[in-house]
Image: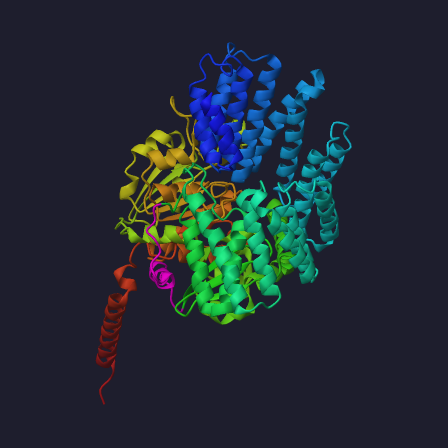
Amino acid sequence: MRAWDEAAAAMADGSPGAVVELLDRALATLGDSTYGKAPAWRAFWRNTAIQLEIDLQRFRSAQRRITELLDSLDDPDNGLSERDRARARAFAFGQRGEVYRRWGLEQPAAHWFEREALLVDACAAEDEASVLNEWLASGEHRALLIAMRHESESIRELESFVASRLADPRMDAALPRARLRRILGIALADAAADDPALADRADRILREVLDELPPDHSAGRVLPGTELAELALARDDPDEARRLLAVAREHVDASTEGEAGREALVIAEARLALATGAGDAELRDRDAALTAAWEAFLERWAALEPREGGYGPLHYAHVRALLVERTRIAAALDGGPAAAELALRLVDRAQSLGRLARGAPPAPASLATTLRDVLRLGPRSGLLVLVPGPRISILVALDDAAPTVVELPAKDTLQRAIDAASATWMAGRRSPDEGSASPAALRALAGHLLPSSLADRTGRWDALTVVGDTLLLELAFEALPARGGSAGTAWAISHLPSLPFARARAARTAPVAPRTAWIASAPPVPAAALALAPDLAPLSLEPEDAARIVRPYDEAHVLHGPEVSVDTLSAAPLERVGVLQFLGHGAYDLLAERPATLVVAATAEHDGLLRAADIVERIRPPPVVVLTACRTGRGPLRAGDQGAADLAGAFLEAGARVVVTSPYDLDVEAARRLSTAFHRGLERGETAAEALRAAREELLRDARFDDPVHHAVLRVVGLGNEASWPAPWWRGPVGLVVGAVALAASAAVVLAARRRASPRV
């Protein structure tokens, strides 16, 4: 058949997109051909198309093909033997897991890789030789899954797993052994940036891998070579790094590592040039190579189909490294302000490809000026943008002065500080009565993230907008020490999903909302929620208790208990009120792309889990939404598209301008008191960020709640430093004048009365 021949030729030419199109045409015209009468051939070419779709990063299309393959395998008349059916199903499970792994979704990836492994083991028990390739693939998937966690425990687990596989008699071929050891070596080299003690093991394994590969085998040499060069650079051996990079460049065009290998190579070459003090000409050459790789990445990413859980365009370490190294070269060539402006533009452009920001207008010529207007930056309010690189991270600061870019400490120093601070924070979260176990660890991290070189700026600020704090993972930025207290009480802090989201949302005229509020409180716990969290119990809260929380407003409406359902919320005129608060339970579905849910009353047509899709499709939220429920702000890491996978992002996508949320489990009493004080501040005309800052300050006066593990758990997301309402007239200039006149008049009356009462002489 001509289509098959053309597909084979396209594959030989390295044109995977053309191969997929030709395979589709061939599959559609198989008919009674030799291939059509051999169902195994049809399954094989379907598998090939799936693998190519994944290589092309067309993940949604790959998922569709995997579903079609699994559906065809369920057909009893598909002509496949039970063995071939099982092998094809194992392949489909593994590829679905691989898509989730590439998306950065560890739990769903683990689920599908486990199903793959179970099926492969079952087949091997009957006929071990027939599923050798599937067994090898399953092992690689398991190794990649462990490596993606980037934790010290996962490195030990990966080493143990690889050792057990290499000891298996089935692992006797040189190439599969080298591929598995390559995964381990690269994982160790990446981890060595955090723990230099791993560098020697990584170096030894990667050199052995390169020695084991046949001399003419270029497929997997580039990434090991660049990792070895990075290790050489870390031990101050630039000559060896240069030699290794030259060898890697000889293989890059023939490598099957794709753009990831090419990008890793240009990044390492740029780092070598900076480390050795290269001249301007070489730095400009390196910048040109980085720019070409960056533009190619943007072009590929822009072609990807939107998906429910967001993109995370800066999720991949090598992409963040492109951004960081371009910024560092700009600083070396053009100085700090120019480099900071470039960093802002690169971050903005990458983030504009995310789900929440897609469709935002292009950044203007002077992005810093626009951000000052959009975020109301000035001498007393600033913006911090964190860009965590795999080896070097940068921080960009902006207020009314020229933007500044700061290199943060080396990755191993910074990561140790983050690990220590996160450990003390999570220990405090597990035992809130004991508080933060080691404030010193938090202070050390704050010293790295808020360096002394920025102290003059940050010391003037009252309000702060933060972008990119995924660097901190489980740790709340608001818990970091600042100004003798915590950051959450020192500054009115708002977190932005992305810079282009802020530009796009601020361009929409803010609605003039009445000073009214709705509160949805204490819905019953449906069976669907208990299936995810069996220990959930109804909140002990009366309607009067909920009404007291929103008492400051001119008008408040309470939905309570069974009234809190998807049907009620979708029918309510929420877009015509000022504030919506949800006070109840959250539940977390680990296998969902957007795992966070709100627990509401079940109805005949709804299971009682209010999901992100329900919010976007059915609810018209007011400008301000307050989610006092556990883990509503939690979701898979989406660097560059933060919020796309959690409920805060869902409400922002649906039209809200500000969402108060938490990625943690909440103490009901602390959450109730924080939200009560928050509403008082909001009604007074304070911004959402300032209202929450003042609420934290009020709560910590109670010794039971004076630790950040209690008051730093809620955060403001969105345009939190814009006022929801103007301050009441008596708090503004007119009020000051009227008050002064009234005070003077009162004083005059009192003085006249005293004179009348005085005896005459």
Q: Is residue 94 above or below residue 703?
A: above
| Residue 476 visible in rendering | no
Residue extending furthest toward the bottom: 761
**Is-magenta flag for residue 719?**
no
Seen from the viewer's position, the closer of residues 217 and 622 is: 217
**Is-magenta flag for residue 371?**
yes
Over which residues does the magenta segment extend?
359-379
Residue at x 69% of width, y 42% of height: 215
Counting from the top left corner in percent of width and height, residue 255 is at 59, 43
Q: Is residue 305 above or below residue 232?
A: above
Seen from the viewer's position, the closer of residues 61 and 548 is: 61
- Side of 714 relative to 83 (left or right): left
Counting from the top left corner in percent of width and height, residue 7 is at 48, 28
Seen from the viewer's position, the closer of residues 540 and 312 is: 312
Residue at x 61% of width, y 26% of height: 116
Seen from the viewer's position, the closer of residues 209 and 552 is: 209
Counting from the top left corner in percent of width and height, residue 292 is at 47, 53
Counting from the top left corner in percent of width and height, residue 370 is at 34, 61
Residue at x 55% of width, y 49% of height: 262
Counting every numbered tag in the picture gives 0
Colour mapping used in the image: rainbow
Quadrant assignment for the C terminus:
bottom left
| Residue 8 visible in rendering | yes
Residue 741 placement: quadrant: bottom left
Residue 28 placement: quadrant: top left
Which SS type dominates the magenta stretch? Answer: loop
